[in-house]
Amino acid sequence: MIKIIGFALIIIAFLIIIVSICSRRQNFFNIREIIRAHFALFDRCRSQYIVFYVAPLLLSVGLALIYNPTAKFYDSISVIISIILSMLLAVLAIITSFDYSNYTNENTRSNILNVVKETTNAIMFETIICVLLLYGMVVVVVQDVVTINAIVNRVLTGVTVFLFSLLILDLLIVVKRISRIIDVKLNERNNRS
């Protein structure tokens, strides 16, 4: 009976967190705006939705059907997520510490600020995925305590693999944006020399 009450309290806590974060009138952390800005990256090339969202979905469903993960699988993902999260926050600190005011060409300054904004949005989106995955790991810990049927286990596996695949693919966006920032910084430095 105590395990059921504990499990119910965990579910209620998750629901409170999700509802409060996804609220429309949220001034503190507007997750809706972050997701909207992330999807705006694909406005110019809608076919990339297939690569970044449909392919991970197919991969996750396929893996959920054929693979029954162990605790080691989730432990490994937790370690990888922690490393990626710390890397993303370090990159965010680096790109926000650059001085972009010294660009003489207004077009270059506008472009670089746009790329910085897109990179920041991509990093925030990645951070949300990392946090969701880490919360999911809590569910996996609870799974060891409370018996969950095979269907729920498959769903958890599918969601975990989908979010992890999305995380890895979206890292490509972050790397591409950072390389553009570095290129502009190097070109500006070469033009001054």
Image: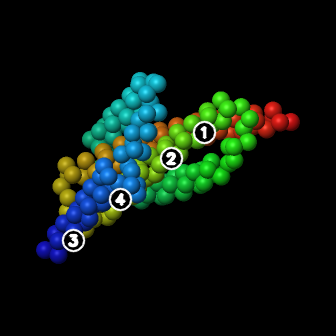
- Dot in front, 2 or 3: 2
Front of the two marks 3 and 1: 1
Q: Regarding mark 4 in the picture, which secondary structure is present there?
A: helix
Name the amino acid, label 4: Tyr
In primary-sequence order, the first of circles 3 and 1 is 3
Q: Residue at x 83, y 36 (%)?
A: 192
Q: How far apart, in angstroms, are the residues tagged by discs 1 and 4? A: 33 Å
Say which residue label 1 marks: 113
Sooner in the amino-acid sequence: mark 2 or mark 3:
3
Residue lying farthest right?
A: 193
Mark 4 lies on residue: 135
- Which image quarter is the C terminus in? top right
* Amino acid tagged 3: Gly
**What is the three-letter code of the residue carrying label 1?**
Leu
The reply to whether the C-beta atoms of the residues labelled 2 and 3 are less than 8 Å apart is no
- To which residue does mark 2 refer? 123
Tell which residue pokes out farthest to the left in this image.
1
Horizontal side, residue 68 vs residue 148: left or right: right
Please identify, in this view, whether the residue under mark 2 or under mark 4 is nearer the observer. 2
Which scheme is used to colour this image of the protein?
rainbow
| Residue 143 visible, this orientation | no
The residue where tag 3 is placed is 6
